[in-house]
Amino acid sequence: MSFLGQWQLDRARERGAEAEAARDDRPRPVQDVLRARVTFPRDAAGARVVARGRWDGGRQLLVAGRELGGRTGFWVLTPLRLADGSGVGVVRGWVPTAADPAAAAPSGTVTVAVTGRLEPAEPPAQRAPGQGSGLPAGRLDRVAATDLIAAWPYPLLTGYVLAESQAPPAAAPSPRPVPPPAPETGLAWQNLSYAVQWWAFALFGLFFWWRLVRDDHAGRLRGGDGADGADGADGADGADDPGGPAPPPVRDDAGAMTATAPSPGARQ
């Protein structure tokens, strides 16, 4: 169990190193990190990527309930069509209201290069069957892969890009950039907790073994004391009657009971 705890500690260090490596400042082509319809790899979260393609502004969405600077507003989520025909959602930024001019969808057929951080799609909201989000058309409450698949009719990457910059630059006004989540550096806490649990099990096992050994030793000592006590009792009985049992009485000619005199060798 101690070995398993050490293994989990090593995994915690490895995952922490992977998270830091994913935050490398050198952007990589997004399709070198993630492909359409492929499960999002754990080590891709926060990777700095560059996505090249054309905006599909007609299918832009607004993600409600997003905070920035202490205010609640919307993320501006626009699909970017990549060269292979797949698409990836790009959070171009944040706006305080849906009517903000910065929320206007991009137009034109110019190929752009968007640099940003790749993040995994969010889990879908838990709703009853047939229940919607209650938001107007064109708005979402989550950047969930299931919702994007229903809204965009082409193969999608199972993540989205938090845009940092665009080349050529977007026309003004532009949404405010959304900062990426705080990176997970150092140890991976889940694996670290597993390591602590395994070590706790190992300590419990040692304690249990110690109790068994202690109780077994105490039982042997008690058994030895009982045997000595029995021997001592036998010896005491012999000491009280060193001469052995007295001879039985005999009847004389007159019928009277008289005690048989002890043998000359008996103690008086």
Image: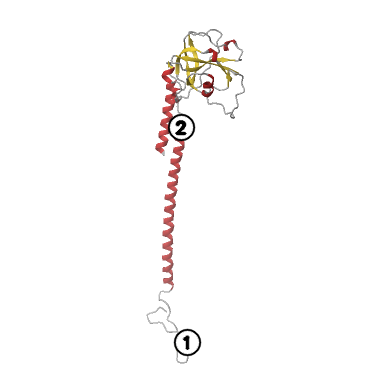
| Amino acid type, residue under disc 2 in the picture | Leu
Q: Residue at x 57, y 11 (%)?
A: 102
Q: Which mark is residue 257?
A: 1
Question: Can I make out residue 66 in this image?
Answer: no
Q: Residues within 10 Å of mark 2 (few under 14, many from 20)?
A: some
Residue 246's quadrant in the figure? bottom left
Which of the numbered marks, if any, corresponds to residue 192? Answer: 2
**Is label 1 in a helix, a strand or a loop?**
strand
Q: Is residue 44 visible?
A: yes
Alpha-carbon span between mark 2 and mark 1: 95 Å
Please tell me which residue is depicted at 42% across the width and 30% down the height of the picture.
Answer: 11
Q: Please state the horizontal and vertical placement of residue 47, each as a whole percent of the image.
A: 45, 20
Residue type pointed to by label 1: Met
Percent position of residue 64, x then y: 59, 20
Nearer-the-camera pick, 64 or 211: 64
Examine the rendered structure and indicate whether residue 156 appears above or below residue 200: above
Q: Quadrant of residue 58?
A: top right
Q: Residue at x 41, y 62 (%)?
A: 227
